[in-house]
Image (cartoon, rainbow, N blue to C red):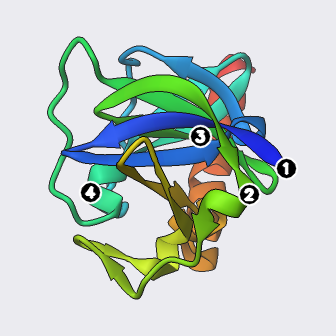
Amino acid sequence: MDTDKHIIFRLKEQTFAVHVQQIVSIERALSLTEVPRTPGFLKGVTEMRGVMTPIIDLRERLELGGVEITDQTRTLVVQVEDMQIGMVVDQATEVKDIPASFIKPAPKLVGEINDTFLLGVATIDDELILLLDLEQIIQFTEKNQLKEIINDIDESGKSMES
């Protein structure tokens, strides 16, 4: 049976998953530098292992309200195309094998989540798991804006050092 490993995490009362191969790391709360004139879901940027990384509030991005920072809050650092992005989630709970045969197409709306952001849904142990499409979380224009912000920060950092 064809199965893939996924990181399982929670936003509000909903369970989500992303493929483990897209995860760079899972971090506790990070110190951020806020960036003015950016989308509300972009909380700031931080440097992680030499890479300037934008941090987004995934709850806000999916229009579920802002995240409430607790001891359980985690930042999933993911690779989306050629960009490293941190996504703040309520809780990262486990790594789970999800058989491909369990994954069904996403309905147009699952709770408050638009199907644009979903690869599909799976039900395991009576729990509905929403599989996120990371490519859709940050759209093309937003990716370009984030790249510009990172370039500006990199250039200002280099000019301060010289």
Q: Nearer the viewer, mark 2 or mark 3?
A: 2
Q: Amino acid at mark 3?
A: Ile
- The Cα atoms of the two marked residues, 4 and 1, are separated by 33 Å
**Element at label 3:** helix
- The reply to whether callout 1 and callout 2 are in contact (CB within 8 Å) is yes
- The reply to whether residue 138 is in sight is no
Q: Nearer the viewer, mark 4 or mark 2?
A: 2
- The Cα atoms of the two marked residues, 3 and 4, are separated by 24 Å
**Element at label 1:** loop
Picture disc at residue 100 = 2
- The reply to whether residue 60 is in sight is yes
Residue carrying label 4: 60
Q: Nearer the viewer, mark 3 or mark 1?
A: 1
**Element at label 4:** helix
Residue carrying label 1: 2
- The reply to whether callout 3 and callout 4 are in contact (CB within 8 Å) is no
The numbered mark, 2 or 3, whose residue comes first in the sequence reads 2
The numbered mark, 3 or 1, whose residue comes first in the sequence reads 1
Picture disc at residue 153 = 3
The numbered mark, 1 or 2, whose residue comes first in the sequence reads 1
The local crowd at label 3, few if under 14, some if 14 to 19, many if 20 or more residues have their Cα within 10 Å, is some
Quick check: 17 left or right of 103?
Answer: left
